[in-house]
Amino acid sequence: MSKEQNEIRNKANSSSRPRFAGIKTFMMLPHSQDVQGLDFAVMGLPFDTGSTYRIGARFGPEAVRSISALIKPYNAYHKINIFDYIKGIDYGDLNVLPGYIIDTYEAVAEEMRLFMDNDVIPVVIGGDHSVTLPELRALYKKHGTVALVHFDAHLDTADSYFGKKYTHGTPFSRACDEGLLIPEKTIQIGMRGTYYGEHSLKESTDRGFTVIPADEAFDMGLDNVIKVIHEKVGTSKVFVTFDIDACDPAYAPGTGTIIPGGFTSREAIKLVRGLSGLNFIGFDVVEVLPDLDPSKITSCLASNIVFEFLSLIALMKKNLSRG
Amino acid sequence: MSKEQNEIRNKANSSSRPRFAGIKTFMMLPHSQDVQGLDFAVMGLPFDTGSTYRIGARFGPEAVRSISALIKPYNAYHKINIFDYIKGIDYGDLNVLPGYIIDTYEAVAEEMRLFMDNDVIPVVIGGDHSVTLPELRALYKKHGTVALVHFDAHLDTADSYFGKKYTHGTPFSRACDEGLLIPEKTIQIGMRGTYYGEHSLKESTDRGFTVIPADEAFDMGLDNVIKVIHEKVGTSKVFVTFDIDACDPAYAPGTGTIIPGGFTSREAIKLVRGLSGLNFIGFDVVEVLPDLDPSKITSCLASNIVFEFLSLIALMKKNLSRG
Amino acid sequence: MSKEQNEIRNKANSSSRPRFAGIKTFMMLPHSQDVQGLDFAVMGLPFDTGSTYRIGARFGPEAVRSISALIKPYNAYHKINIFDYIKGIDYGDLNVLPGYIIDTYEAVAEEMRLFMDNDVIPVVIGGDHSVTLPELRALYKKHGTVALVHFDAHLDTADSYFGKKYTHGTPFSRACDEGLLIPEKTIQIGMRGTYYGEHSLKESTDRGFTVIPADEAFDMGLDNVIKVIHEKVGTSKVFVTFDIDACDPAYAPGTGTIIPGGFTSREAIKLVRGLSGLNFIGFDVVEVLPDLDPSKITSCLASNIVFEFLSLIALMKKNLSRG
Amino acid sequence: MSKEQNEIRNKANSSSRPRFAGIKTFMMLPHSQDVQGLDFAVMGLPFDTGSTYRIGARFGPEAVRSISALIKPYNAYHKINIFDYIKGIDYGDLNVLPGYIIDTYEAVAEEMRLFMDNDVIPVVIGGDHSVTLPELRALYKKHGTVALVHFDAHLDTADSYFGKKYTHGTPFSRACDEGLLIPEKTIQIGMRGTYYGEHSLKESTDRGFTVIPADEAFDMGLDNVIKVIHEKVGTSKVFVTFDIDACDPAYAPGTGTIIPGGFTSREAIKLVRGLSGLNFIGFDVVEVLPDLDPSKITSCLASNIVFEFLSLIALMKKNLSRG
Amino acid sequence: MSKEQNEIRNKANSSSRPRFAGIKTFMMLPHSQDVQGLDFAVMGLPFDTGSTYRIGARFGPEAVRSISALIKPYNAYHKINIFDYIKGIDYGDLNVLPGYIIDTYEAVAEEMRLFMDNDVIPVVIGGDHSVTLPELRALYKKHGTVALVHFDAHLDTADSYFGKKYTHGTPFSRACDEGLLIPEKTIQIGMRGTYYGEHSLKESTDRGFTVIPADEAFDMGLDNVIKVIHEKVGTSKVFVTFDIDACDPAYAPGTGTIIPGGFTSREAIKLVRGLSGLNFIGFDVVEVLPDLDPSKITSCLASNIVFEFLSLIALMKKNLSRG
Amino acid sequence: MSKEQNEIRNKANSSSRPRFAGIKTFMMLPHSQDVQGLDFAVMGLPFDTGSTYRIGARFGPEAVRSISALIKPYNAYHKINIFDYIKGIDYGDLNVLPGYIIDTYEAVAEEMRLFMDNDVIPVVIGGDHSVTLPELRALYKKHGTVALVHFDAHLDTADSYFGKKYTHGTPFSRACDEGLLIPEKTIQIGMRGTYYGEHSLKESTDRGFTVIPADEAFDMGLDNVIKVIHEKVGTSKVFVTFDIDACDPAYAPGTGTIIPGGFTSREAIKLVRGLSGLNFIGFDVVEVLPDLDPSKITSCLASNIVFEFLSLIALMKKNLSRG
């Protein structure tokens, strides 16, 4: 498939076809469910049953795919054409059962084994943040406990909401409870806004997570944030999860639980680029709500973050091949 | 409370306070959770976990309350000031657990007993259509099986979606299975659009329900539709449920599963007014999605339908008092 | 100016210039404040201080002018190129003092004398409905008491709001109090929705006005409505005022106090066309709120109503010239 | 492919997969460019360079595909599961060169030969109305001159705009000039609004076309409109083109050149259904502008019209098989 | 009430009730008009008659209340749960007379005496900026002349607009004229954009006010801005007024008179936090226009600013109790 | 005309007329096509046929004019009332042929000679970026080759798109090919995002252009960027072109090909102000798409950039007069 895919890719990336045309896949990647021999698969996880306030992330994958037509394969910062080092597909959307979080968790964890079994790095477009838990479960079966880099306005380590253990505010409590994460290699960046109380802030640190709130990140400087991430994660296998509300509402209005004071797009991209060199096993970007994104700047930003994820994979493969 | 409430009402309905001002309750009704001695209680049921396509009805009650400030107490068609015959409150919202349909069903059915125990007619603002099931369960405990008048673009009598029994496409299958309805006194009006197959159309009639699709309704004339409803329902206790998508998308764009060819606002109001004389025990209007309703015409239409519901209660009380 | 204007008009109406281009005037009419020798002048009255709920009609004239670029000069129903019989301008906007209704009334009544003095028929784009009062005052100085044809969802004959005599809900009470109208030749069409009480309905009829609520209009048929208008108005000088909320919110979402159950666009245009033959002295269309009109269908409908007004003037001039 | 396609279709149409999930094709049809053995192919023609006012129909195909997820295969009016009689695909989008109308015409006419050569009926989602000309050119090579049924608010038979022969206001002048149409079997329905002059109205009739303006259509009744269409077209091969602005702006706000007074959704669907029995060789629906369609009711209506087109093909095939 | 209120507050702030549910008050505070024994009262002042350009701030209080559901009581920057030190209510909206600025001024100043008489700090959600004048009048009766900290893109010290003394562009001229302010302790921050002339800039400084335009604020650094504020205000009683257009349109699009180059959300919050230690007697945030705020980021930012105001009160009370 | 214009200007800029009123011209400038004796003319170039993705810049001039009502004549940064030094008009829109890029190029270049012949500096509001080519052609006839300062997210130096030489992605390739520019005095600032490949980056530098990508601009500091521009351009005649997408999508959502990571409004204005002292012969701002700009912040930013352009002309004239 490599050759065929290459041709399709070349065609897609040439100037010969208008960017608004055609069936929409991420970056005009071929749509396939055959994952053999691939480096990565982009996939949607259109599930938003875990949302506790504004809702609609089920349409996130469609919106991110749509605007991703603007993205081209050369990353000028990293000086790399990603497709020189990696090949992949748009798998389409994982199966979900809207309204049923536990069933969806099971279905997702099961379906994602396909990627694990084939050594394909999953790059997931959510969905609300509750979807990261089944992703981590699927990864655990292959990789065991992993490090986590988590960008977000919220800690998402509440114990429960309304007495319920599974919502978009609890995935990392559960992941920790289930032993999917290495707590001392779990780092959360960008938290801000208000809390239920001082105890809320400890919900993460009590588990051994490292927390760099937005204010602290700005004070220490983003270069130092990046340094801390590398120190904490080291060479461990790492999953990266990016809640788009880590960015300020001015940059990401189309999300559910907006909090002023977040990252600009420049800062967000800088942070993701700074992860280069880690040992990635998976990625997701979550909480894009297209109905609240009239000019599509939120899904555009998310699509660029996915592209930076792909660039990180490409750099990793490039370095491996140099070995 | 009657006197005090009356005063508040008079103040609210006078021209002395701008309609955009104040804490928003339905029609500026007093907000209270004391239901003793009331005829009706308007309440929100902000639950949308049952939604299978566009989602966001959790914000429906807020939007309907907001625009209801435009409604005044005199119904010129029925020639009645509704508050001359009935008194009531805005109860606020029933407790829900977003993401958890079965738990929410239990909580709602439990909380609604308050109204049953006090002979207060509940007038519910949804929420997606899945919320009608717990309402019917609550009513059953008080009233036994009831007749149903159901306006909708969809039958909502699928057996299941994605293998799941509880969604916004199945409430009336479940209500029938649970023995909450009198099938031969259950009538569904306004269905249209496309179906999975011929069998879909039989899902209702096989249960003994009467179905008047939109096309048939227009062909027979709305006066005859009203006549059939009265014939079917007779003097039985009846619940009225109005899915706003019974109206055409031009009139109700802010809903989840739009289908062209529906009722105009004039037709919708005429149909609800035509129910006068039935023996009402409860009402709901569902599936208002404010994020898809930029000019608020959908929530405005819904608020007028709620007002027509209140007028039906007032007429019923008026007639009883004459009895 | 006639020749020059004609050329500009011809150019404007040809296919040689894109409709989205150029400084926006109504129908690409020349913008001038020289009114000598004209038949009509279109003008904006961007005043919305009288609004009691949603507000923003100050941007109505701009929006109606913008979309009026779509309108061409031939009226196929009346079989008339309006510019064969009338000439006119876009005068721009009348001077207003936002926030100051009484001062604005004085300024408007004063400025409008220019048209009266030059026998130019004013065609006004509002603004909220409070603007009709100063128009009627200006007309009175020239014409004395006049007949009124009033399309609206509301009677606008409240005595006062919040104890204030001048709002967009009271212009016709004031006009009547001030002796500007011939009550028995004042006819109001399209009222619907809810009222403060039975007395509200009498506020107009007690003054001697004729009221044809929307329901009654549909029952009697629009042809009969038109017949009644002609019977009532006869050959008296008549002012026509069209509140865009006479139309259903589906057709005119961009207005302040929406009420379901109104006229369709087809019905609205039919009613205005049916006025042909009356003795017109002025027109206005009011209550277009562009910020609530995302697809601009409301301002488009209003611009077509203005065009129908101009057609009525053209027909009147045509008939006069035949004498 | 038939079996495989059938399975995909069955899966797609079952209740097992949420309608918001997956790569978006029309009605979840398989995406393929292999057209052998098919009855129909749905395709996008995302070209809007011919637009003379509001623009953006290049995103029309994407929007119509997206909301078409709501459509199911059973047509209750015609009592037919369309896939019992026809099979087809979503071909994706035809190649276009944005900004270059003549080149695009050539490319489209060339690429569409694929369907002609394989006896596949093309069902095109535009694009502005300029796209119908290359479709007719492609059809001509196979079928010779054809009959045309044209629903629209505009005649689209101007000779030129701004001195240019090819725009979205001229396709049927050109088609007539090029001898692609049978003028006496060309019928245009729904025209309304204003014109440059009396001559504009004759631009069609002078060519021998039949024109039924909206007003006339309402006066004569839609059943009679349908009768006239059948009489005019008879058994000739016929192309059906539906400009969404044939519908009133209340029903189709998301289009470029809105004119009040158009068809309701009910009327539009009735008219299309009424075409049953003609000898169809192709269809298109054009002028959907998603950026002006905040609640997506326009693209939803268009997607239903495409479904009715497919139903007409299915009925034709069903009748042929009975033959 | 303290205990009861505490319980309500605890319930409101727990995770037991979804944030989208319930009658909307600021931060789910109890709605009451009994102000005895309170530290603060949040209230709406839905008045926009003073607006000179885009209008609609009358819906500001409703929008800010709605999105304030996202706010929790713990301020991580100040390390304080505000309800540990202060108690308060959502008073609802002050009485206004839309369209009548002078009458509204009187009514507001009168009604606000309730808070002064009970030593309750008013925290007002506007409304356009004209509302600050009656607030200052009310405060004057209790506190005499006060210091003012004023964040805004505009000076709001014009002498008049259109010859009128009372608009949203003149409140601080009037406040100065009326002797409500201590000019040398009045400081204005964030001004930018264009002016009528050099004299405009002097309208404030000539009165003795200190002006720190946006450019100067960035040049000197926000820490120094904060230092200057403290130096100027000292221990005087101070009112804080925050016009949301102090923030850049990217962060606060939903306001009337946008000017590029303003504060980011981070900067705005930093500035407000920096006020800690002053002797506060009242606050307002003004000029939120929900109809121009499709993703609600403006009202969200405003709600966070109100929360920071409450935090400042809590800190003040905390320090007082330590004495 | 100077005196008359001055009076109009004074009136326009006084506080006597509401900013939302009147026929909309840029900054309420007089609309005229008589350019004799002027220093500058603002004009629209409503052409978007060159757009390759989102489209609609044809409505850019109207939107920029509308919101420019907020702009006043005094520039506080430069301490200059621009009308003390320059006089000018709003010329209206240049003639375009939508859908026909080559014809439009010819028409524009021809019509713009009017300004060259009269030594009037053109200040153009686009339109997509393809419009800069005919502007440069017109300037060339008067001035010969010129320097270029180009702010943009994109290089716009592709050789062709879809095999076509003229699109909004190629104007500077063509300008270079046609010898309109001095390559070593052509400087491009703000590029970012993704590319087709490493070669894309060389498309500009191979032509001798200087490129300062966004990342580099931030790294070197904007003061240094300004210094480099002055060094490169020197005293040559220079044209300034500002693609609004140079700004981040948070600040300029209403444009076609958004890329995160751009300039803030503060940075953009700082850069334009920094150009002071160059020898300007013309300006444009392009790619404003109003339909994607719900709160009008993009057109507001663009209108401020036009004002900064005018300020640069005023400063140049001021310096010359001192000379």
Image (cartoon, coloured by chain):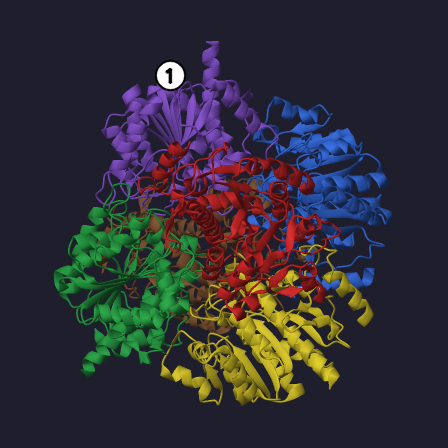
Chain colours: A red, B blue, C brown, D purple, E yellow, F green
Percent of width and height locating residue A266: 45, 61
Percent of width and height locating residue E239: 60, 81
Badge 1 element: loop
Any part of residue F79 in sight: yes
Residue that mark 1 sits on: D235
Horizontal relation, residue B60 to residue E294: left or right: right
Rendered position, C116 above or below E172: above
Q: Residue at x 22, y 52 (%)?
A: F173
Horizontal relation, residue C178 to residue A1: left or right: right
Rendered position, B141 above or below F193: above
User: What amino acid type should be assigned to the residue bearing mark 1?
Assistant: Thr
Q: State the residue in front, F258 or E208.
A: F258
Q: State the residue in front, F236 or E201.
A: F236
Toward the front, the furthest residue is: A323
Q: How many numbered tags mark residues here?
A: 1
User: What chain does badge 1 belong to?
Assistant: D
Horizontal relation, residue B273 to residue C311: left or right: right
Q: State the residue in front, F284 or C239.
A: F284
Percent of width and height locating residue B102: 75, 41
